[in-house]
Image (cartoon, rainbow, N blue to C red):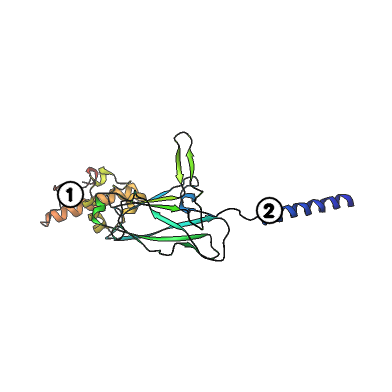
Amino acid sequence: MKNICYLLVACLAVTCLFSCEKELHKYEGKPTVYFNETARPLAYSSEVLKDSTVISFSLTKGTTVDSLVHMVIATIGNSVDKDRPYKIAINSSSTAIEGKHYQMITKDLSIKKNQLRDTIWLRFMRTPDMKDQNFTLSFDLLENENFSVDMQYKITNQTTGQRLNFINYRWFINDIIKKPSRWLDFYLGTFSRTKLNLMVEVLNVDPQYMDTNISIAETLAYGKFMQRYLNEQKAAGNLILDEDGQPMNMGSSAQ
């Protein structure tokens, strides 16, 4: 019995020794920097990853003029007791203009002392030309004296060669009108920006809610309420026209 106990103690000692040695193992080689967003699953899926983000002002309520966003730069390696600048550049494919379409809020681009991540804050400005054009802002991480960019991409589809890029991150910005996904023509009629804006004003409804959460019963109620409103305005001598210059009407089921 004593021999068995001695054997167990010896095994535990060896296991502890190897465990300690593993914990003491240090990262070797030049630290690597990459876009953390690419390696982070989306909130609604544990499998979906992305290397770009779409910013659309089209379904924002009211007269929103800008959007404050951020992206996280992460490192592989050990933290150190000093700030380490990293290098980032605007890709030549970018069409967004600094000072007009976007502003870099963060100026100090460095992994701070004893940290492994840094956050870059950006502001996108809503401009009239976004109603007709999609603008792109593309960032590249570059190697410098502090960091390599060895973690470049991950193949996500062996057949097509589709891949995720860890050292390039893109923002797509527009104000191109989008028909809410839950818009039903037989309740709300033909979609237009003019009609959507009027519904937002009269009903005080959030366009994002109409895109993701509105129920069929609510859609019918909105249609009927808006048709009654249009009829009342017409009777009062205020004929409301749609974008095509014709009198605005809701769907056939809302008449």
Q: Mark 2 — residue?
A: 22
Q: Residue 232's quadrant in the figure? A: bottom left
Residue 65 place in picture, x, y as percent? 29, 61
Residue 203 place in picture, x, y as percent? 26, 57
Viewer-nearest residue: 230 or 194: 194
Q: Which residue: 48% across, 35% down?
A: 158
Q: CA distance from mark 1 to mark 2?
A: 68 Å
Q: Seen in the image, is 215 located left or right of residue 5?
A: left
Q: Seen in the image, is 19 located left or right of residue 245?
A: right
Viewer-nearest residue: 40 or 170: 170
Viewer-nearest residue: 13 or 216: 13
Callout 2: helix, strand or loop? helix
For badge 1, the amino acid type reads Glu
200 is higher (above) or lower (below) than 220:
below
Question: Residue 33: which disc?
Answer: none
**Mark sitting earlier along the chain (1/2):** 2
46 is higher (above) or lower (below) than 71:
above
- The residue lying furthest to the top in this view is 159
Q: Seen in the image, is 61 located left or right of residue 105?
A: left
Q: Tell me how many marks there are.
A: 2
- The residue lying furthest to the right in this view is 2
Residue 123 place in picture, x, y as percent? 35, 60
- Mark in the foreground, 1 or 2: 2
For badge 2, the amino acid type reads Lys
- The residue lying furthest to the left in this view is 237
Q: Mark 1 — residue?
A: 243
Residue 15 place in picture, x, y as percent? 75, 52
Neighbourhood count class around disc 1 (C-alpha, 10 Å): few under 14, some 14–19, many 20 upward:
few
Q: Residue 24's quadrant in the figure? A: bottom right
Q: Which residue: 16% across, 46% down?
A: 244
